[in-house]
Image: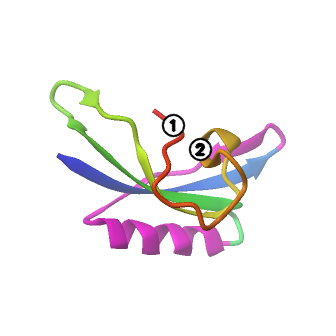
Amino acid sequence: MIYYVALPFVRLDEGLVPGEAVECPHAAAAIRRAAALASASTNAGAVAFSRSGDPDTGDFDEAVVLRIFGEVPDEIAGQPDDDRTGSSGFP
C-alpha cells in the first residue's frame, strides 16, 4: 500500500520540528496540501512524501520526497532547495 503525506515543520528554539502529518489520497493532493501548510504563518516549511508499506506488519520502505516547500530539516532536504523532487532523506 502507498501512503501520501504532507508534513509541516515549525521553527522552535531547538530548530525545525515536525508538525501534524496529514494523510492524502494521492501524490498531487499531498503536494497541494504541503504547499498550503508551508504558506501558513505558523510553519517554516513542509514536505510532501510517499511511503510504501504494510501497516499490519509495520514494514515500510524508505520515504520518497515528492516536493519540498520552504524550510525543512537538512536530513530531509539534503540541501535547502524548495524545487527538489524524487529524493529521499528520511526513513
Residue at the disc numbered 1:
90
The residue shown at (23%, 37%) is 53
Q: Identify the disc placed on residue 48.
A: none
Report x, y in % for residue 8: 57, 57
64 left or right, relative to 12: left
The residue shown at (17%, 46%) is 1
> What amino acid does circle 1 point to?
Phe
Are discs 1 and 2 less than 8 Å apart at CB? yes
Report x, y in % for residue 81: 69, 61
* Mark 1 secondary-structure assignment: loop
Distance Cα–Cα, label 1 vs label 2: 6 Å
Residue at the disc numbered 2:
76
Report x, y in % for residue 42: 70, 64
Quarter containing the C terminus = top left
> What amino acid does circle 2 point to?
Ile
Which of the marked residues, 1 or 2, is nearer the chain's N terminus? 2
Q: Is residue 21 magenta?
A: yes
Report x, y in % for residue 57: 17, 24
The residue shown at (28%, 51%) is 3
62 left or right, relative to 41: left
* Mark 2 secondary-structure assignment: helix
Q: Which residues are magenta?
A: 13-40
